[in-house]
Image: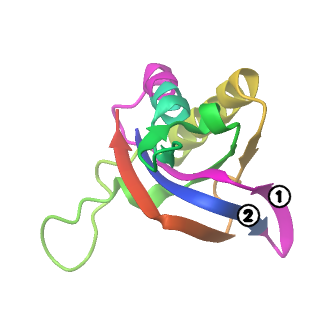
Amino acid sequence: MIGLLQRVTHSSVKVEGETIGAIQQGLMVLIGVEKEDSKESAVKLLAKLLKYRVFADEAGKMNLSVSDIKGGLLLVPQFTLAADTKSGLRPSFSSAASPEKGKELFEYLVRKARNEYPTVAAGQFGADMKVELLNDGPVTFRIKV
């Protein structure tokens, strides 16, 4: 499972012009699901996202997690993160999970996050989404579990 996290001052996701998820300061995370991923992968990714230290402490060092600052967590499904771009000029999606498995694991991740953390918003699997964010830094990390 892949999480492309971005530290944001705010972020939102819209479907058909309607905002379905929004956060203020926190993490907007694009989620890619690969064939070999499982519920265990989702649990590991969530644990890492909630504790990954990307926010500045009093000394200006990246030493605080989204949990430490009580920030928001916006999870957005992104099928294209599972693309293989090593060769050619067109991405291959042979390592991506099937749409059914991708949806199941993304929705599982969102449920787990909402059970463990108070401020969670989410995009909609399979929808044409418009994501807005103000990347703070910019700070972006790719996490693969």
Task: Classify mark 2: residues with Cα within 10 Å, few (<14), some (14-19) or many (20+).
Answer: many
Q: Amino acid at mark 1?
A: Ile
Under circle 1, the secondary element is strand
In the rendered image, residue 36 lying in the magenta stretch gets the answer yes
Name the residue rendered at 22%, 66% in the picture. Answer: 85
Q: Amino acid at mark 2?
A: Ser
Report the quarter where the C terminus lies.
Answer: top left
- Asked whether, in this view, residue 39 is left or right of residue 91, the answer is right
The stretch in magenta equals: 15-44
- Asked whether, in this view, residue 93 is left or right of residue 10, the answer is left
- Asked whether, in this view, residue 67 is left or right of residue 16, the answer is left
> How far is mark 2 from mark 1, CA to CA?
8 Å
Front position in the image: 124 or 22: 22
The answer to which of marks 2 and 1 sits earlier in the sequence is 2
Q: Name the residue beneath numbered marker 1.
A: 20
**Residue 47 vertical placement versus 85 (above, below):** above
- Asked whether, in this view, residue 63 is left or right of residue 28, the answer is left
Residue 14, percent from left and from top:
77, 68
Report the quarter where the N terminus lies.
Answer: top left
In the rendered image, residue 18 lying in the magenta stretch gets the answer yes
Q: Name the residue beneath numbered marker 2.
A: 12
